[in-house]
Amino acid sequence: MIIIKNIEIYAPEKLGKKDILIGGNTILDINTNITYPHAEIYDGSNMIGIPGLIDQHIHITGGGGEGGFATKACEANFDDLIDGGVTTVLGLLGTDGYSRSIENLISKAKGLKEEGMNSLCVTGSYAYPSITLSGSIAKDIMFIDEIIGCKIALSDHRSSHLTLAEFIRLASEIRTAAMLANKAGIMVIHMGDESSGMELIEKALEQTDIPITLFRPTHVNRNPSLLAQAIRFNKQGGWIDLTCQDEPIALTYLKLKNNGCQMDHVTLSSDGQGSWSKYDDEGNCIAFGISSVKALHQELCTMVQKYEIDLAEALCCMTINPANALKLRNKGQIAINKDADLVLLDQHLQIKKVMINGQWYK
């Protein structure tokens, strides 16, 4: 048993200063003056307790390579994730579904789980037909525990430029498999800068009864036109994901709020270990870099300290919202009978301790 004493709790809603009793991997009680025989006591005075951060877009096997083989990014490192306050990851592939494989992705997810991280992934990459482990998107989702959906790219010069029929067929396969396996069943959609934007998603919703919640467009803050489409999509009930490296994300968040968006359907992710790249008018890669897996915590500090967004509000986008989006019912909040995934911050929001499933890792 572990008791964290006298800690200011943001669950993500503010609960005030309380004690937290943890047994095994579970939060057993949240109250004042908790006692338990022989429990390990941790003094949380002058500290803030928040749920572990959930990053639903990390290239755990590394991304990049768009400037040649020497530019491929390294795999995500467990210690770096912990240092960024991340306790749950959703791993995925990107442009490179050729030298990187679903086999590699799943084995990395399993390796992170062995180290203590909560780890899921999606099959597929930018390309269509989607690469899989089993030869079938549906079988990957149904029979591989870690896989909860599929990734594809739209409106990007690196995508396969699917037809509407192909896009609908892909969505239908994800939908059916997820129902049979009782999983989230998401289509993670990398959105590029082409003028078509989210048109395929809009047309699929017009022509089918596929739930809007299946489609998960990400990087929607990369240009104003795409963001405008994403706002409409969100107001219809869709989930949208903002990428932390696209600055200034706090201003984008406030714009969504001021436009009447459903803020409980807005998430933030890092694109960690993925590459960002810039191209000239002839399509040549002229600059690239690697996104940090610590971006969520960095954005949390910026949102609260620079833009004065309430801590409880800012936390939702990286805790309870992605937990709900991924159907992780025991994650994303500090509450009785939920998993003990906690991050302890000092008064300057710097990370001091990280707990995953009741175990300290920092």
Image (spheres, grey):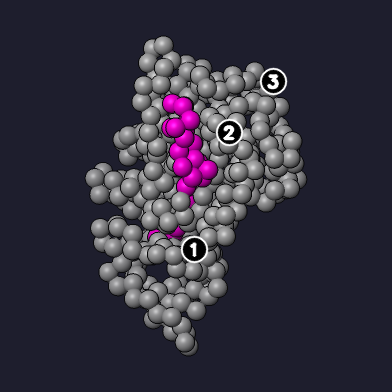
Residue 358 included in the magenta stretch of the image? no
**Label 2 environment density (alpha carbons within 10 Å; few <14, some 14–19, many ≥20):** few
Give the x, y percent position of residue 321.
49, 48
Task: Tell me the amino acid under the disc marked 3.
Answer: Ala
Asked whether the beta carbons under mark 1 and mark 3 sit within 8 Å of each other, the answer is: no
The picture places residue 208, in percent across and down from the top left corner, at 69, 26
Residue, disc 3: 165
**Can see residue 49?**
no
Q: Label 1 amino acid? A: Ile
Q: In the image, is residue 51 part of the stretch drawn in magenta?
A: yes
* Dot 3 or dot 2, earlier in sequence: 2
* Residue to which mark 1 is pinned: 356
Farthest front residue?
Answer: 70
Indicate left or right for 351 with 268 as reference.
left
Q: Residues within 10 Å of mark 3 (few under 14, many from 20)?
A: few
Magenta region, residue range = 49-76
* SS at circle 3: helix
